[in-house]
Amino acid sequence: MRWMVTEMTAIVSRRTAIGLLATSALLPAGIARAATGRLYLNAYGSRGGFGVAGFDAAGQIRYSLTLPGRGHGFARSRDVAVAFSRRPGDYAVVFAVRDGIELHRIAATGDRSFCGHGAFTPDGRLLFATEAVGSTGEGVLGIYDAAQAYRRIGEYPTHGLDPHEIRLMPDGRTLVVANGGILMLAGMPRLKLNIPDMNPSLVYLDSATGRLIRQVRPDHELRQLSIRHIAIDRHGRVAIAMQYEGPETDQVPLVAWHGGPEERTGLRFLPIPPEQRAGLRQYCGSAAMDDGGRLLAVTSPRGNRMVLWDMDQQHYLAAAGMSDVCGVAAQADSAGFLVSNGLGRIASWQHGLKVAALQSSTGWKWDNHMLAVTA
């Protein structure tokens, strides 16, 4: 996620008027008080280091927790959450959702590094983390037992390179994993070694056995579409936000959906006006469904914009501009979304409201992902 300063603008379709409503300024860092109701988690960076904060729907910080390095995404189960380090990551921190107290710290093991995301089983007993094998780049899911202080008890292959986001499907058993398809090795952790021959895929796995249920790939001519972020709608369909590693002038789709583990067809791409597709600059940074599971929001920090689709009708609704925006999570009662950016700002993106200027914040730079939780 980059940090830049540009004006925030609205880009609205004829069908739907969408806007941004500024929230109140954030409270000073270091607050740690118990919270109730819906909270939002977001990693941040500052001159003082890195951390994760919990804040309410008004943007008021309820607590902050120091992290040993740059954070990325989250997993949550009941009263705990896990903050994962940015890939190639060497830690994950388990903390109490209500007050941000650190409970456990998980170190990456052996030749494995964390890839920024994870998911729990419904009972909270097992945590699955996307990981990469440093010597080969192959993807695995590390399996951690919460009852044994998050001891690593095994792993499953993800059947691809560069696994990133992972979600648990509504059946409570199937895991869906976004394999980005990019080869990176431990000795050159940010160097992409196979761009001409990428092999991204969306993979469904049985969480109880690791069995591969289904693997879905883009067509060969779209092999440079790195599958990275996913969200699940109210019908159990998987929305997919991608990043294109080919030329910026190529006109390729960036947002797709798939019908789930029983669906035998390939990816289906969501419509978007050409000017909005070009405005994403080949990069989608995060995806989230609204509280009702109908509206899909996708953010692009490179494109400085957010785009909205109706998944029931599978049509484009609108877009709005915000500098370096990436974090996005549902507000309560289908009221819209909260969004965050690399300038340390938080905004409410609601229907029927116009764009308003954002307030200044603590100076923190919010990282890529936001998670809504109930404390």
Image (spheres, grey):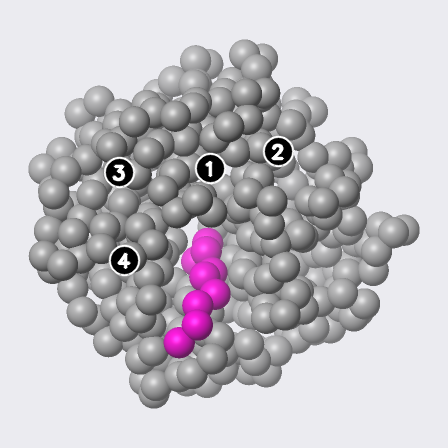
**How many other residues sit within 10 Å of disc 4, few (<14), some (14-19) or many (≥20)?**
some
**Alpha-carbon span between mark 4 and mark 2:** 30 Å
Q: Secondary structure at mark 2?
A: strand
Q: Earlier in the sequence, mark 2 or mark 3?
A: 3
Relative side of 176 to 144, left or right = right
Q: Decide if residue 365 is on the left or right side of residue 210.
A: right
Tell me if mark 3 has few (under 14), some (14-19) or many (20+) residues whose alpha carbon lies within 10 angstroms of its own.
few
Q: Earlier in the sequence, mark 2 or mark 1?
A: 1
- Per the model, the C-alpha gap separating discs 3 and 1 is 24 Å
Q: Residues within 10 Å of mark 1 (few under 14, many from 20)?
A: many
Residue 143 within the magenta-colored segment of the rendering:
no
| Label 3 or label 1, whichever comes before in sequence order | 3
Mark 2 belongs to which amino acid?
Ala
Q: Which residue is mark 4?
A: 124
Per the rendered image, the range of residues in magenta is 364-375
Q: Amino acid at mark 3?
A: Ala
Q: Kindly indicate the quadrant of the structure image that contains residue 350.
A: bottom right
Was residue 371 drawn as part of the magenta stretch in this picture?
Answer: yes
Residue ID for mark 2: 256
Which residue in the structure is indicated by mark 1? 228
Q: Residue at x 58, y 33 (%)?
A: 259
261 vs 74, left or right, is right
Instruction: From the viewer's side, name the closer residue of 227 and 236.
Output: 236
- For the C terminus, the quadrant is bottom left
Task: Work out whether residue 342 or residue 264 is closer to the camera in this orientation and state it.
Answer: 264
- The residue depicted at 43 percent of the width and 24 percent of the height is 214
Q: Mark 3 sits on what residue?
A: 208
* Disc 1, SS: strand
Q: Is residue 282 visible?
A: no
Which of the two residues, 79 or 297, is positioned nearer the viewer here? Answer: 79
